[in-house]
Image (tube, rainbow, N blue to C red):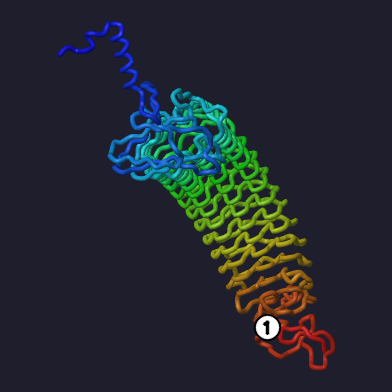
Amino acid sequence: MKNRLTFIPHSLRMTLLALLTILASVPMWGETSDVKSNVDYLCFTAEEAGSTISFMQAGGNYGSGSVKTSIDGTTWTDYTLNTEIKLQKIGDKVYFKGNYHGSFEDYSKFFMTGKIAASGNIMTLTDGDSPTTSLKGERGTFFSLFKNCTSLTTAPELSATTLTMGCYYDMFKGCTSLTTVPDLPATVLTEGCYGSMFEDCESLKKEPKLPAKKLADGCYNNMFKGCTSLATAPELPATILANSCYSSMFEGCTSLKKVPNLPAIALANHCYSYMFKDCTSLTTATELPITTLAESCYSKMFSGCTSLREAPNLPATTLIENCYNNMFYGCTALTKAPELPATVLVAGCYYQMFQGCTALKKAPELPANTLVDDCYNNMFYGCTALTKAPELPATVLANGCYYQMFQGCTALEKAPELPAKTLADGCYNSMFYGCTALTTAPELPATVLTDGCYYQMFQGCTALEKAPELPAKTLAGNCYLGMFAHCENLDYIKVAFTNWGSDDFATLVWTNNVASTGTFVCPEGLAKEYGEDRIPKGWTVISSTQEATGIENATPTLSEDEGNTYNLAGKKVGKDYKGIVIMNGKKMIK
């Protein structure tokens, strides 16, 4: 039988063939076809049978725009938000495209189960069939897009070279199966663009290149925080920094052994703060040659780096607020501190700088003569190997300047001289608290006290036997509160004040748990009141005059002379004596 087309004119035959070809390519009802063979659409491939993926509303509203899906990259269907797509077999794929635009307030994110690899260009999710390399005008476009997708093993291509504020913020945070990351080609960054992008990706082993030479505020903030498998950091060629640009960038990267060079020629506020905090495998630090600092620029930079043995040189002579705050906090392997040549200090400049550096044996020189608020606050707290303190020549003090400076330095045997005659509130508060090896206290020449000036200064110094002379004649609020508490071998105190004052806290528990017997030297007019807030029970009281003339034991101890009566000068009186007397440690009128 002859082909019926042979009876149809040639021109009509060609027209019918063309029509049949077109009809064959038209999708069924509800589908659309858009053949763009050169477009690399965002694609998800199952690496485990039965894996699922869905695109779900996560914050506020959905975002804006629409999304389509395809199983072959050719035929597309409209996607309904929150619909789960199941990939039955290993190798099954699903493609996404659309004009989706998220923000920090309104966004959607992918949810996955099983094991899924992403590929293709992420820009097809926002630009559809005509992906660009610009996110200009968008804010937080891909915010949290794959956050906590623990099934994601590889990331898609991120081709954008023009970024916008927070565009990739939190994008892969918590993707614990992600081992590699895509290239990040942008050379011009924006505020927070890579913030927390790979935070807590604990399987991540390979870092991307970061070619930008000029940074923006918070651009790398928390970028690799908690990436515990990351052993190598990317090169950081930027020479122009911005506020918080590297803040916490590698915090908690416990496998990181070497830090990159930091070639910046100028610092910015918080630029390196927390950058390598808790990088417990880090053994050496990079050079930090810049001499002009910025606020909190090195704050907690190496805090918790327990393997760090040597600190970088710190040549700056002009400081700024909190510049070295907690810089080496908890660096338990650090044996030597860098020189600190600055003579002009600022508030909090050395706050907790070496706290918890338990291997540090020698402190750096501290040449400043004028102090500022909290400048040495907790500076060597808990440095249990420190045997010698630096000289402290300052004669002008400030509030809290030496607060807890050597607290817990259990190997410190001798305190530095403290020449200041004018005090400030809380200036020596807890300065040597818990220094259990301290046998000699410094002279304290000040005659005018301030609120809390010697608060708990020597508390817990169990080897201290003799207190420094206290020449002040008038007490101030909290001035001696807890000063010698728990100095269990202390058996000598000499004071110059003539009354206990009206503030019950001035000498509160100041002799709690000192030696059971000792000598208390005081002016004749001081009331002989006993207890942990006054004169220690069981101690012998003598006047300053009696000590100077060699007459001792003028007033028997309370434990030796129960029931006897004394006048306010400490002299024993008879039962017929009239006036204010002391009997069994208590004042009364006869």
Q: Quadrant of the C terminus?
A: bottom right
Q: Residue at x 31, y 13 (%)?
A: 16
Horizontally, is 288 left or right of 258 in the view?
Answer: right
Residue 201: x, y in percent?
42, 43
Horizontally, is 18 left or right of 145 in the view?
Answer: left
Residue type at the position of mark 1: Thr
Q: Is residue 291 positioned above or below 510 on the image?
A: above
Q: Residue at x 40, y 27 (%)?
A: 32
Residue 234: x, y in percent?
44, 34
Q: Quadrant of the N terminus?
A: top left
Horizontally, is 42 left or right of 220 in the view?
Answer: left
Q: Is residue 517 positioned above or below 211 on the image?
A: below
**Residue 285 shows in the view:** no
**Residue 180 shows in the view:** yes
Q: Residue at x 68, y 61 (%)?
A: 443
Which residue sits furthest left? 1
Q: Nearer the viewer, residue 226 or 490?
A: 226
The 10 Å Cα crowd at callout 1, few under 14, some 14 to 19, many 20 or more, is many
Q: Quadrant of residue 562?
A: bottom right
Q: Which residue is mark 1?
A: 557
